[in-house]
Amino acid sequence: MTTVLIADDQPLQRFGSRMLLESQDDMTVVGEAANGSEAVRMAAELHPDVVLMDIRMPGLDGIEATRRIIAAGDRTRILIVTTFDLDEYAYAGLRAGASGFLVKDAQPEELLSGIRAVATGDAVVAPA
């Protein structure tokens, strides 16, 4: 079972992600964070396999949250999922230690396969 923490400041986005992930037999959502600080704290407490990390969030952004989660040395992997398909965000996220980068307009199947790939140690980057 792949455990997932959803970090996104938009409640509807978190809800939709949770619904999609919980429809899968091999995934379970262990928590939701509305900002980067919550994501760092919850990742340390819950030790999820994967964090779905938004970039633009109030307070601590997703890039810095990624950096802090990775620096903690846990096995948690980060998959950045953002509205903004900007190369600089992808590069910054990957430099911070993320294992993947997808844009929120990806198909549900792409997100699910991205989570599975990242959970097993592979990398995923949106083709665009």
Image (tube, grey):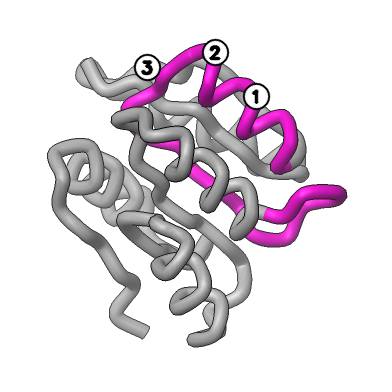
Q: Which residue is mark 3?
A: 28
Identify the residue at image location x=41%, y=46%. Answer: 78
User: Looking at the picture, how far across and down is residue 23, in whole percent?
Assistant: 35, 22
Q: Which residue is mark 1?
A: 41
| Mark 3 residue type | Thr
Identify the residue at image location x=34%, y=59%. Answer: 100
- Direction from residue 50 to residue 114 in the image, left or right: left
Q: In the rendered view, tell whether residue 69 sits above or below residue 4.
A: below
Residues packed near mark 3 inside 10 Å, few (<14), some (14 to 19) or many (20 plus): some
| Mark 1 residue type | Arg
Q: Do tag 2 and tag 1 residues touch (Cβ < 8 Å)?
A: yes
Magenta region, residue range:
36-61
Local secondary structure at mark 2: helix
- 9 or 104: nearer the eye? 9
Local secondary structure at mark 1: helix
Among the two numbered marks 1 and 3 on one chain, the one whose residue lies closer to the N terminus: 3
Residue 91: which quarter of the image? bottom left
Question: How far is disc 2 from disc 1 in space, using C-alphas?
Answer: 6 Å
- 20 or 96: nearer the eye? 96
10 part of magenta stretch: no
Local secondary structure at mark 3: strand
User: Looking at the picture, how far across and down is residue 127, in whole percent?
Assistant: 29, 80
Residue 55: which quarter of the image? bottom right
Mark number, residue 51: none
Q: Do tag 3 and tag 2 residues touch (Cβ < 8 Å)?
A: no
Question: How far is disc 1 from disc 3 in space, using C-alphas?
Answer: 19 Å
Identify the residue at image location x=21%, y=15%. Answer: 1
- Direction from residue 3 to residue 14 in the image, left or right: right
- 108 or 96: nearer the eye? 96
Q: Which residue is mark 2?
A: 45
